Image (spheres, grey):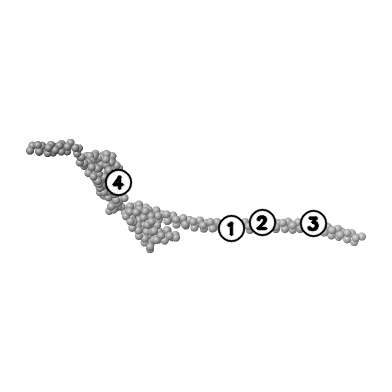
Amino acid sequence: MRLIYLPVVVILLAGLLGQSGAPTQSQPRERTHESIDLEFRSGNAMEYVAAIRRQGADVNIVVTDDLRDIAVREISLRNVTIGAALEVIDGNHELSDGRVISVDIKMHRGHPATEPIYLVRSQVAGRSRGTTLMSRVWSLAQPLAGPATADQILTAVEAALALYGTQYPAADLRFHDETSLLIARAHPEQIDTIAAVLGELGRGDAGAGKDAATAAAREQAESMRRAVVDCETRSAIYREEIRDLRTRLAEMEAEARARSMQLRDTEGELRRLQDMLNGRREN
Protein backbone atom coordinates (compact mmCIF):
# COMPACT_ATOMS: atom_id res chain seq x y z
CA MET A 1 0.00 0.00 0.00
CA ARG A 2 2.86 2.37 0.72
CA LEU A 3 4.31 1.70 -2.73
CA ILE A 4 0.98 2.56 -4.31
CA TYR A 5 0.53 6.00 -2.64
CA LEU A 6 4.18 7.09 -2.74
CA PRO A 7 4.22 8.10 -6.45
CA VAL A 8 1.05 10.05 -5.95
CA VAL A 9 2.58 11.96 -3.06
CA VAL A 10 5.74 12.59 -5.08
CA ILE A 11 3.72 13.89 -8.02
CA LEU A 12 1.69 16.20 -5.79
CA LEU A 13 4.83 17.54 -4.14
CA ALA A 14 6.46 18.10 -7.53
CA GLY A 15 3.42 19.99 -8.73
CA LEU A 16 3.41 22.19 -5.68
CA LEU A 17 7.12 22.87 -5.98
CA GLY A 18 6.71 23.70 -9.69
CA GLN A 19 3.95 26.19 -8.99
CA SER A 20 5.92 27.87 -6.23
CA GLY A 21 8.96 28.23 -8.50
CA ALA A 22 7.04 29.72 -11.49
CA PRO A 23 7.03 33.53 -11.81
CA THR A 24 3.78 35.22 -10.80
CA GLN A 25 2.24 38.31 -12.53
CA SER A 26 1.92 41.32 -10.19
CA GLN A 27 -1.40 43.15 -9.96
CA PRO A 28 -1.39 46.85 -11.06
CA ARG A 29 -1.35 49.34 -8.26
CA GLU A 30 -3.33 52.54 -8.39
CA ARG A 31 -1.10 55.59 -8.74
CA THR A 32 -1.89 58.64 -6.75
CA HIS A 33 -0.57 62.19 -6.98
CA GLU A 34 1.83 63.33 -4.41
CA SER A 35 0.90 66.42 -2.47
CA ILE A 36 2.22 69.75 -3.68
CA ASP A 37 3.01 73.10 -2.14
CA LEU A 38 2.05 76.19 -4.10
CA GLU A 39 2.92 79.85 -3.66
CA PHE A 40 1.03 81.99 -6.17
CA ARG A 41 1.55 85.72 -5.93
CA SER A 42 -1.35 86.97 -8.05
CA GLY A 43 -2.41 86.96 -11.68
CA ASN A 44 -5.07 85.38 -13.85
CA ALA A 45 -6.51 81.88 -13.89
CA MET A 46 -4.35 80.77 -16.83
CA GLU A 47 -1.21 81.73 -14.91
CA TYR A 48 -2.54 79.91 -11.85
CA VAL A 49 -3.06 76.69 -13.85
CA ALA A 50 0.45 77.05 -15.29
CA ALA A 51 1.85 77.36 -11.75
CA ILE A 52 0.09 74.11 -10.77
CA ARG A 53 1.55 72.36 -13.83
CA ARG A 54 5.04 73.37 -12.78
CA GLN A 55 4.57 71.75 -9.37
CA GLY A 56 3.62 68.28 -10.64
CA ALA A 57 5.84 66.06 -12.77
CA ASP A 58 2.99 64.07 -14.34
CA VAL A 59 0.15 66.57 -14.23
CA ASN A 60 -2.40 66.34 -17.05
CA ILE A 61 -4.51 69.50 -17.24
CA VAL A 62 -6.54 70.42 -20.32
CA VAL A 63 -7.88 73.99 -20.50
CA THR A 64 -10.54 74.32 -23.19
CA ASP A 65 -11.20 78.06 -22.86
CA ASP A 66 -9.28 81.25 -22.25
CA LEU A 67 -9.16 82.01 -18.53
CA ARG A 68 -7.07 85.18 -18.68
CA ASP A 69 -10.04 87.42 -17.82
CA ILE A 70 -10.40 85.74 -14.41
CA ALA A 71 -8.27 87.37 -11.73
CA VAL A 72 -6.73 85.19 -9.02
CA ARG A 73 -5.40 86.75 -5.84
CA GLU A 74 -2.40 85.62 -3.85
CA ILE A 75 -2.71 81.95 -2.81
CA SER A 76 -0.55 79.84 -0.49
CA LEU A 77 -1.23 76.08 -0.39
CA ARG A 78 0.51 73.36 1.61
CA ASN A 79 0.31 69.60 1.15
CA VAL A 80 -2.67 69.58 -1.25
CA THR A 81 -3.50 67.44 -4.26
CA ILE A 82 -3.67 68.74 -7.83
CA GLY A 83 -7.45 68.42 -7.80
CA ALA A 84 -7.75 70.39 -4.58
CA ALA A 85 -5.51 73.14 -5.98
CA LEU A 86 -7.65 73.38 -9.12
CA GLU A 87 -10.85 73.57 -7.10
CA VAL A 88 -9.73 77.01 -5.95
CA ILE A 89 -10.86 78.47 -9.32
CA ASP A 90 -13.92 76.23 -9.64
CA GLY A 91 -17.23 78.14 -9.60
CA ASN A 92 -18.48 81.57 -10.69
CA HIS A 93 -16.26 84.61 -11.14
CA GLU A 94 -17.61 88.15 -11.60
CA LEU A 95 -15.52 90.27 -13.97
CA SER A 96 -15.08 94.03 -13.93
CA ASP A 97 -17.31 94.47 -17.00
CA GLY A 98 -20.25 92.75 -15.28
CA ARG A 99 -19.91 89.32 -16.89
CA VAL A 100 -20.06 86.22 -14.71
CA ILE A 101 -17.73 83.42 -15.86
CA SER A 102 -18.42 79.91 -14.60
CA VAL A 103 -15.39 77.58 -14.31
CA ASP A 104 -16.00 73.84 -14.15
CA ILE A 105 -13.30 71.34 -13.11
CA LYS A 106 -13.75 67.67 -14.06
CA MET A 107 -11.36 64.77 -13.41
CA HIS A 108 -11.22 61.83 -15.84
CA ARG A 109 -9.31 58.59 -15.16
CA GLY A 110 -9.14 55.89 -17.82
CA HIS A 111 -7.37 53.25 -15.69
CA PRO A 112 -6.37 53.12 -12.03
CA ALA A 113 -2.72 52.74 -13.06
CA THR A 114 -2.71 55.96 -15.14
CA GLU A 115 -2.58 59.57 -14.08
CA PRO A 116 -5.93 61.41 -14.12
CA ILE A 117 -6.77 64.12 -16.62
CA TYR A 118 -8.22 67.36 -15.28
CA LEU A 119 -10.53 69.16 -17.71
CA VAL A 120 -10.96 72.89 -17.07
CA ARG A 121 -13.85 74.54 -18.91
CA SER A 122 -15.44 77.98 -18.67
CA GLN A 123 -18.49 79.76 -20.03
CA VAL A 124 -20.37 83.02 -19.57
CA ALA A 125 -22.96 82.27 -16.93
CA GLY A 126 -24.68 85.65 -17.06
CA ARG A 127 -24.22 89.15 -15.78
CA SER A 128 -23.96 90.63 -12.37
CA ARG A 129 -26.94 92.58 -11.12
CA GLY A 130 -24.51 95.27 -10.11
CA THR A 131 -23.54 96.11 -13.71
CA THR A 132 -23.18 99.89 -14.00
CA LEU A 133 -25.69 101.53 -16.33
CA MET A 134 -26.07 105.18 -17.21
CA SER A 135 -28.52 107.33 -19.15
CA ARG A 136 -27.90 110.04 -21.71
CA VAL A 137 -29.97 112.18 -24.06
CA TRP A 138 -28.98 113.54 -27.49
CA SER A 139 -30.76 115.95 -29.81
CA LEU A 140 -30.99 114.63 -33.37
CA ALA A 141 -32.22 117.93 -34.78
CA GLN A 142 -28.95 118.63 -36.58
CA PRO A 143 -28.48 115.12 -38.06
CA LEU A 144 -32.13 115.05 -39.13
CA ALA A 145 -31.64 118.37 -40.93
CA GLY A 146 -29.55 116.44 -43.43
CA PRO A 147 -30.59 113.61 -45.74
CA ALA A 148 -30.59 110.93 -42.98
CA THR A 149 -33.89 109.83 -41.42
CA ALA A 150 -34.50 108.86 -37.80
CA ASP A 151 -34.72 105.16 -38.74
CA GLN A 152 -31.39 105.34 -40.57
CA ILE A 153 -29.71 107.02 -37.59
CA LEU A 154 -31.09 104.42 -35.15
CA THR A 155 -30.00 101.62 -37.49
CA ALA A 156 -26.45 103.01 -37.52
CA VAL A 157 -26.41 103.19 -33.70
CA GLU A 158 -27.75 99.64 -33.34
CA ALA A 159 -25.16 98.33 -35.81
CA ALA A 160 -22.38 99.85 -33.71
CA LEU A 161 -23.81 98.41 -30.47
CA ALA A 162 -24.13 94.95 -32.04
CA LEU A 163 -20.32 94.73 -32.10
CA TYR A 164 -20.34 94.18 -28.31
CA GLY A 165 -22.30 90.94 -28.67
CA THR A 166 -23.13 89.60 -25.20
CA GLN A 167 -20.38 91.55 -23.46
CA TYR A 168 -22.95 94.01 -22.06
CA PRO A 169 -26.72 93.96 -21.59
CA ALA A 170 -28.70 95.19 -24.58
CA ALA A 171 -28.89 98.98 -24.64
CA ASP A 172 -32.33 100.53 -24.14
CA LEU A 173 -32.89 103.13 -26.90
CA ARG A 174 -35.92 105.42 -27.16
CA PHE A 175 -36.54 108.10 -29.82
CA HIS A 176 -39.00 110.91 -29.08
CA ASP A 177 -40.31 112.02 -32.45
CA GLU A 178 -41.93 115.28 -31.30
CA THR A 179 -38.70 116.69 -29.84
CA SER A 180 -36.17 114.71 -31.96
CA LEU A 181 -34.50 113.43 -28.78
CA LEU A 182 -32.68 110.09 -28.54
CA ILE A 183 -32.70 108.66 -25.01
CA ALA A 184 -30.40 105.75 -24.11
CA ARG A 185 -29.72 103.70 -20.99
CA ALA A 186 -26.73 101.39 -21.31
CA HIS A 187 -23.24 100.53 -20.13
CA PRO A 188 -20.79 103.49 -20.20
CA GLU A 189 -18.84 101.98 -23.10
CA GLN A 190 -22.06 101.59 -25.08
CA ILE A 191 -22.95 105.21 -24.27
CA ASP A 192 -19.55 106.30 -25.61
CA THR A 193 -20.15 104.31 -28.80
CA ILE A 194 -23.56 105.95 -29.34
CA ALA A 195 -22.00 109.37 -28.82
CA ALA A 196 -19.25 108.55 -31.32
CA VAL A 197 -21.76 107.48 -33.98
CA LEU A 198 -23.89 110.60 -33.50
CA GLY A 199 -20.76 112.73 -33.50
CA GLU A 200 -19.73 111.34 -36.87
CA LEU A 201 -23.22 112.00 -38.23
CA GLY A 202 -23.03 115.57 -36.91
CA ARG A 203 -19.66 116.10 -38.53
CA GLY A 204 -21.04 114.72 -41.77
CA ASP A 205 -23.93 117.20 -41.69
CA ALA A 206 -21.57 120.03 -40.81
CA GLY A 207 -19.36 118.96 -43.67
CA ALA A 208 -22.33 118.99 -46.01
CA GLY A 209 -23.19 122.51 -44.83
CA LYS A 210 -19.61 123.59 -45.37
CA ASP A 211 -19.66 122.08 -48.83
CA ALA A 212 -22.85 123.98 -49.66
CA ALA A 213 -21.35 127.23 -48.35
CA THR A 214 -18.17 126.57 -50.30
CA ALA A 215 -20.16 125.90 -53.46
CA ALA A 216 -22.12 129.13 -52.96
CA ALA A 217 -18.90 131.07 -52.40
CA ARG A 218 -17.37 129.54 -55.50
CA GLU A 219 -20.44 130.43 -57.55
CA GLN A 220 -20.32 134.00 -56.26
CA ALA A 221 -16.61 134.22 -57.03
CA GLU A 222 -17.24 132.87 -60.53
CA SER A 223 -19.97 135.45 -61.05
CA MET A 224 -17.62 138.21 -59.92
CA ARG A 225 -14.90 136.86 -62.19
CA ARG A 226 -17.29 136.95 -65.15
CA ALA A 227 -18.25 140.52 -64.22
CA VAL A 228 -14.58 141.51 -64.08
CA VAL A 229 -13.93 139.91 -67.45
CA ASP A 230 -16.93 141.74 -68.88
CA CYS A 231 -15.69 145.03 -67.45
CA GLU A 232 -12.22 144.41 -68.82
CA THR A 233 -13.70 143.62 -72.23
CA ARG A 234 -15.78 146.77 -72.16
CA SER A 235 -12.78 148.75 -70.96
CA ALA A 236 -10.75 147.45 -73.90
CA ILE A 237 -13.53 148.46 -76.27
CA TYR A 238 -13.75 151.88 -74.65
CA ARG A 239 -9.99 152.31 -74.89
CA GLU A 240 -10.15 151.43 -78.57
CA GLU A 241 -12.97 153.92 -79.09
CA ILE A 242 -10.98 156.56 -77.21
CA ARG A 243 -7.98 155.92 -79.46
CA ASP A 244 -10.23 156.29 -82.51
CA LEU A 245 -11.69 159.50 -81.14
CA ARG A 246 -8.24 160.86 -80.38
CA THR A 247 -7.13 160.00 -83.91
CA ARG A 248 -10.17 161.72 -85.38
CA LEU A 249 -9.60 164.71 -83.09
CA ALA A 250 -5.99 164.96 -84.22
CA GLU A 251 -7.10 164.80 -87.83
CA MET A 252 -9.73 167.46 -87.22
CA GLU A 253 -7.20 169.67 -85.43
CA ALA A 254 -4.78 169.27 -88.34
CA GLU A 255 -7.54 170.09 -90.78
CA ALA A 256 -8.51 173.11 -88.70
CA ARG A 257 -4.92 174.34 -88.67
CA ALA A 258 -4.71 173.87 -92.42
CA ARG A 259 -7.92 175.78 -92.94
CA SER A 260 -6.74 178.48 -90.56
CA MET A 261 -3.56 178.88 -92.58
CA GLN A 262 -5.57 178.89 -95.78
CA LEU A 263 -7.85 181.52 -94.29
CA ARG A 264 -4.88 183.69 -93.36
CA ASP A 265 -3.51 183.32 -96.86
CA THR A 266 -6.89 184.30 -98.29
CA GLU A 267 -7.10 187.29 -95.99
CA GLY A 268 -3.61 188.38 -97.07
CA GLU A 269 -4.54 188.03 -100.69
CA LEU A 270 -7.69 190.10 -100.12
CA ARG A 271 -5.73 192.85 -98.40
CA ARG A 272 -3.25 192.91 -101.27
CA LEU A 273 -6.05 193.18 -103.79
CA GLN A 274 -7.69 195.90 -101.72
CA ASP A 275 -4.46 197.84 -101.65
CA MET A 276 -4.11 197.53 -105.42
CA LEU A 277 -7.66 198.71 -105.90
CA ASN A 278 -7.14 201.68 -103.65
CA GLY A 279 -3.95 202.64 -105.55
CA ARG A 280 -5.73 202.66 -108.86
CA ARG A 281 -8.44 204.88 -107.51
CA GLU A 282 -5.90 207.43 -106.38
CA ASN A 283 -4.33 207.53 -109.82
The answer to whether residue 40 is above or below residue 251 is: above
Residue position for label 4: 63
Q: Earlier in the sequence, mark 4 or mark 1?
A: 4
Number of other residues with Cα within 10 Å of mark 1, as a class: few under 14, some 14 to 19, many 20 or more:
few
Please tell me whether mark 4 sits on a helix, a strand or a loop: strand
Q: Which mark is residue 239?
A: 2
Residue mark closest to the camera, 2 vs 3: 2
Amino acid identity at mark 1: Arg
Q: Amino acid at mark 4?
A: Val
Label 2 or label 1, whichever comes before in sequence order: 1
Spatial distance from mark 2 to mark 1, Cα to Cα? 20 Å
In the image, taking residue 216 as reference, residue 9 lies left or right, namely left
Q: Position of residue 144 (x, y in %)?
A: 42, 60
**The residue tagged with tag 2: helix, strand or loop?**
helix
As measured in the structure, the alpha-carbon distance from the residue carrying label 4 to the one carrying label 1 is 78 Å
Q: Which mark is residue 261?
A: 3
Residue 80 visible, this angle: no
| CA gap, disc 3 and disc 4 | 127 Å
Q: Of circles 4 and 1, which is in front?
A: 4
Q: Quadrant of the N terminus?
A: top left
Question: Which of label 2 and label 1 is nearer to you?
Answer: 1
Q: Residues within 10 Å of mark 3 (few under 14, many from 20)?
A: few
Q: Amino acid at mark 3?
A: Met
Across the whole image, how many numbered discs are drawn on residues? 4
The CA span between labels 1 and 3 is: 52 Å
Q: Earlier in the sequence, mark 2 or mark 3?
A: 2
The tag earlier along the polypeptide, 1 or 3, is: 1
Question: How far is mark 2 from mark 3, CA to CA?
Answer: 33 Å
Q: Earlier in the sequence, mark 4 or mark 2?
A: 4
The residue at 9%/38% (across/down) is 4
The reply to whether the C-beta atoms of the residues labelled 2 and 1 are less than 8 Å apart is no
